Image: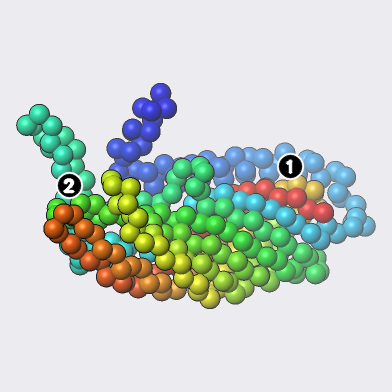
Amino acid sequence: MICGYLYYWWKMKNKEKNIIKVLFIALTISILITVYPVSILALDSDDDPNQKLRRWTVSAYLGSASSGPAKDLENAMKATGFDHRYEWYWGGAGPFYGATYPNSNTRTALYRLPWILRIHYLLKPRFGVGLVYSNTEIGATAGYNEKTGRFDVEYSVNTFSPVVSVQVTGFQFGVGPALYMANSIGKRLTLGESLGEKKTRKLGFLIDLGFAFPPEKTRFFLEIKIQYRAVGQVEVGPYEIRATEDLVIFPTNKVNYNHWFLGAGMGIRF
């Protein structure tokens, strides 16, 4: 059954995968919203206006990222000749299977989902400061050339950002400078060959939005998290793709690593 599901997922188009991801996130949000009225009932012991303010918050989130440099990489692959269509024939009839290149996908496997860790401290009831760290495997872009075959570029970003935030009745808005580690790896998956890895440090900024419920005072809470990561332009490549006597060079390209994060998580106040 699991193998059948994996095969079905592999045969899906990227558009269909993205629809399923959106439905999954929407379902998660719906569940969290459903929990809200029940959570409000748990505030009985927190209605005391003299209760000590819980200043520290630690929270964690899982979610999905937008495509980042995917479009720029697809355009670069088209310009380099990695835009051929792959077709596989079986028994003289077909094609049995075909794929159009270049194409991109975002990470969907649970163990590769983007995640965030966040520590926050309230200076005043509505104003605070915090630290955000995240690991985001954005996805991969694949190209195909008839002479040299397929090659992929995988891309990810690590984020560290101090933020200043304001919060009102469960809604939180934060912004701050960010140090990004933008990663890219060229691969030939069919041969298990690595074409090179590049890590680039970038200074940018981070916008951090959250919708928590119960909104305040309770020990535990659930939260919807939205972030915009302004990473900027990052150099990817060059890669040499060889096949016997054929050689195609994918040159260095500057691509836009800016991306969004949408997810949900939980935290504790103390």
Q: In terms of secondary structure, where does tag 1 sit? A: helix
Q: Which residue is mark 2?
A: 86
The residue that appears at 33% across and 67% down in the rendered structure is: 237
Q: Quadrant of the N terminus?
A: top left
The residue that appears at 33% across and 33% down in the rendered structure is: 8
Q: Which mark is residue 132?
A: none
- Name the spot of residue 125 as percent of width and height, x first: 80, 65
- Name the spot of residue 32 as percent of width and height, x first: 62, 43
- Name the spot of residue 116 as percent of width and height, x first: 60, 55
Give above or below for 56 relative to 238. Answer: above
Q: In terms of secondary structure, where does tag 2 sit? A: strand
Instruction: Please state if 127 lies on the left or on the right of 30 as rendered.
Output: right
Label 2: how many residues lie within 10 Å, few (<14), some (14-19) or many (20+)?
some
Give above or below for 139 relative to 88. Answer: below
Lower sequence index among marks 1 and 2: 1
Q: Nearer the viewer, residue 185 or 107?
A: 185
The residue that appears at 60% across and 75% down in the rendered structure is: 177
Residue 63 seen anywhere in this rendered image of the structure: yes
Q: Amino acid under label 1?
A: Ser
Q: Which residue is mark 1?
A: 39
The residue that appears at 46% across and 59% down in the rendered structure is: 156
Instruction: Please state if 220 lies on the left or on the right of 229 as rendered.
Output: right
- Cα–Cα span, label 1 and label 2: 53 Å
Quadrant hosting residue 160: bottom right
Residue lying furthest right: 50
- Name the spot of residue 140 as percent of width and height, x first: 37, 54
Quadrant hosting residue 35: top right
Give above or below for 195 relative to 34. Answer: below
